[in-house]
Amino acid sequence: KAGVTQTPRYLIKTRGQQVTLSCSPISGHRSVSWYQQTPGQGLQFLFEYFSETQRNKGNFPGRFSGRQFSNSRSEMNVSTLELGDSALYLCASSLSVGSNQPQHFGDGTRLSIL
Amino acid sequence: DQQVKQNSPSLSVQEGRISILNCDYTNSMFDYFLWYKKYPAEGPTFLISISSIKDKNEDGRFTVFLNKSAKHLSLHIVPSQPGDSAVYFCAASATGSNYQLIWGAGTKLIIKP
């Protein structure tokens, strides 16, 4: 069974640009969550999607947005990139929302802002 | 305000000995706790979890202990093996908050041969 796939693995952008990251969940998983990880910090929750609807949202500015498609694949978009957006962005999938099921993570997209 | 704290950024343990990783939390509403392990260039992988109705959960070499009165949990790895060298994250969730996971900053465990 294929795991969670995130593309691209690495990305370099400059300030002011925008970026779109992609996540394909494990087959059959309908919930997708996005996290930001910076050095010395835990995973900071961005948002969670289930059945194409955003179910939960973390404390990030509106420049961070996401969506989920009918096949459960998800994208997140960051507009007007800032230096502080440099981080590892992780996607995790689980069967559904509203339970304590462990999340399964992809290997992340390393975003560097110059 | 960090609701989940892992106060040791790193820990070094001799191979074959016990590794003890600690995690403290401040939110008394947390009722489910998980440990994840992360190797460099890979995403975190689920290791073990514990519900607040228990004080111990064991899975092979891994045991998690929960002390609700102290708002403290720990992960014990016995015996420690070289492959256990990784960053370990503690995470917590509360039923009333849509099970959103709150994560600690992680502890880097180094197993010395």
Image (spheres, coloured by chain):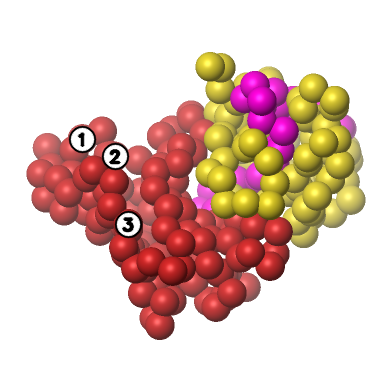
Chain colours: A yellow, B red
Is residue A36 highlighted in magenta?
yes
Q: Residues within 10 Å of mark 2 (few under 14, many from 20)?
A: some
Q: Secondary structure at mark 2?
A: loop
Q: Nearer the viewer, mark 1 or mark 3?
A: 3
The numbered disc on residue A82 is: none
The image quarter containing residue A25 is top right
Residues tagged by mark 3 and mark 2 found on one chain of the structure: yes
The answer to whether A6 is drawn above or below residue B60 in the figure is above
Amino acid under disc 3? Asn
Residue B91 at x, y percent in the picture: 51, 57
Contact check, label 1 and label 2, Cβ < 8 Å: yes
Q: Earlier in the sequence, mark 1 or mark 3?
A: 3
* Spatial CA span between label 1 and label 3: 23 Å
Q: Residue B72: where, in percent of width, then height?
A: 39, 72
Q: Which mark is residue B85?
A: 2
B83, above or below A42, in the image: above
Disc 2: host chain: B
Q: Residue at x 88, y 46 (%)?
A: A63
Residue B36 visible to an observer of this rendering = yes
The Cα–Cα distance between marks 1 and 2, rounded to whole angstroms, is 6 Å
Residue B4 screen position, x and y as percent: 52, 66
Comparing B102 with A83, the one in front is: B102
Task: Identify which residue, B22 or A17, lies in the foreground.
Answer: B22
Q: Position of residue B34 (x, y in %)?
A: 46, 54
Most foreground residue, A26 or A9:
A26
**Does the rendering let one see residue B106?**
no
| Residue at image mark 3 | B57
Q: Is residue B52 magenta?
A: no
